[in-house]
Image (cartoon, rainbow, N blue to C red):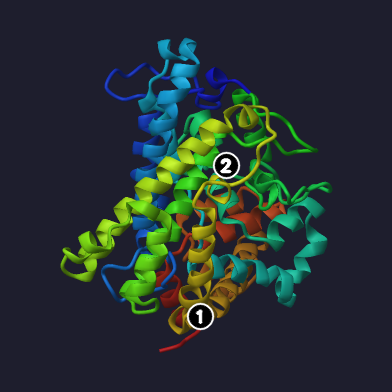
Amino acid sequence: MNWSQLLSAQRLDQKPDTIETSRSAFEQDYDRIIFSHPFRRLQDKTQVHPLPEHDFIHTRLTHSLEVSSVGRSLGKRVGEVILQRHPELQKDYSLFDFGAIVAAASLAHDLGNPPFGHAGEDALSDFFLHHPQGQAFEKLVTQEEWNDLLKFEGNAQGFRLLNKKEYGLKLTAATLGAFTKYPCPAYFPHRDKKRKSQKKFGFFQTEAGHFQKVAQTLGLLPQKETSWCRHPLAFLVEAADDICYSIIDLEDGCRLGLVSVDETVSLMASILGEQFNAEKLKKHIGLNEKLGVLRALVIGKLVEECTHTFLDQEQTILNGTFDQALTDVCTSKTALENISRISVEKIYRSRHVVEIEAAGHVVLPGLLNEFIQAGFHLVNKLPSRKYANLALLFPEEVRAAIEQNTDHNYKVLRHVIDFVSGLTDRYALSMYRKIKGIG
């Protein structure tokens, strides 16, 4: 792969933009995402702690903004050295372009997440895996489509949203490539889970052709069947996400009293090593200030380590042989593994989180069952006042999309899943209560 092609500002299926001197195409990508409807919904979507009652706990929105900030730093640091190594790029690109691509892709990285976080992904999958109403669709779709339905994947849903005509985002190929951490479909026979890029999937069957165009535009190296190597900057997007959720989930856990202050400080100090100064930390008054200082130092150290790892591996990344998370091979990998272990034990399995996640496993399959029947009511025009009324709860564009695909079961299901997965946590809970007649 070569950088000049990987940094393509081409917007697919669109004539080249008029050059805007004040903003690069990649900065325009960032602005388009931040003003989009799917991004706004992240304000009330779970990061770790569903339906938070505390104003300092992160939602998907604040998490995405923080990941984007870290991503920009990573992109600029890497870009500065890449431009020195490849001076021919300096005519068309600056370090700010690298930063803007990673920042935009990082900003969008969680757009496809459903209500109730990762539990929501499992809940939507469970409808087709375990519920008779969902299992009945296996005979009505292709094997590839069925595999999409069996595993709701937030990354693939995010790619779908970024390319839906109704949102009009039309992002550059470079940003779409950097966004796609898993450039493969849900189903292909020779998946290699030793490759980080194939542990999940990055696009549904409805967007397979679109991603193929992205891959061709960027010159991504093909792998087995319908899979490709990652865009190099996708490693930086992943690192920004890994850094933020590792450190900031721990910080939230400490604020909620799930992890002690002493243990939190010790875990962060294990990353800082000789940079950690216990006496200097004591001079800061209050938990917020202490955590803020530690967080800044730790994120700075991890950004530096991931930058060095990426640059050390540049050639193996470009030839497609490197396929690991940067945080899995950086100097602080053991410290990050310890933080992950503590977070699973004390934060992600805390009673409050588990209780709300359990509710998600009732709410989301329940909504999916009712609205799938409403969707097929639009298709078949069956005499049912209940489902005629429920169909009216679809946004106008969803009803129109369903009515335009009456001969394609999978596409109808996909549009209904778009609707349910796009709901915010509170709205999903409220709607479920209303349609089930719960007070």
**Number of callouts in the render?**
2
Q: Is residue 133 above or below residue 323?
A: below
| Residue type at tag 2 | Thr
Within 10 Å of disc 1 (Cα), the crowding (few <14, some 14-19, many 20+) is some
- Picture quarter with the N terminus: top right
The residue at 55%/72% (across/down) is: 364
Q: Is residue 215 above or below residue 420?
A: above
Mark 2 or mark 1, earlier in chain:
2
- Tell me: 35 left or right of 14: left
- Tell me: 388 left or right of 254: right
| Residue type at tag 1 | Val
Query: Circle 2 sits on which residue?
Result: 180
Q: Position of residue 88 (x, y in %)?
A: 48, 10
The residue at 51%/29% (across/down) is: 174
Within 10 Å of disc 2 (Cα), the crowding (few <14, some 14-19, many 20+) is many
Residue 151 picture quarter: bottom right
Numbered badge on residue 309: none
Q: Is residue 415 visible?
A: yes
- Tell me: 50 left or right of 281: right
Q: Position of residue 180 (x, y in %)?
A: 57, 42
Q: Is residue 107 visible?
A: no
Tag 2–tag 1 contact (CB < 8 Å):
no
Q: Position of residue 354 (x, y in %)?
A: 51, 80
Residue 385 picture quarter: bottom right
Q: Position of residue 402 (x, y in %)?
A: 60, 54
The residue at 65%/63% (across/down) is: 376
Q: CA distance from mark 2 to mark 1?
A: 29 Å
Query: Circle 1 sits on which residue?
Result: 354
- Secondary structure found at label 1: helix
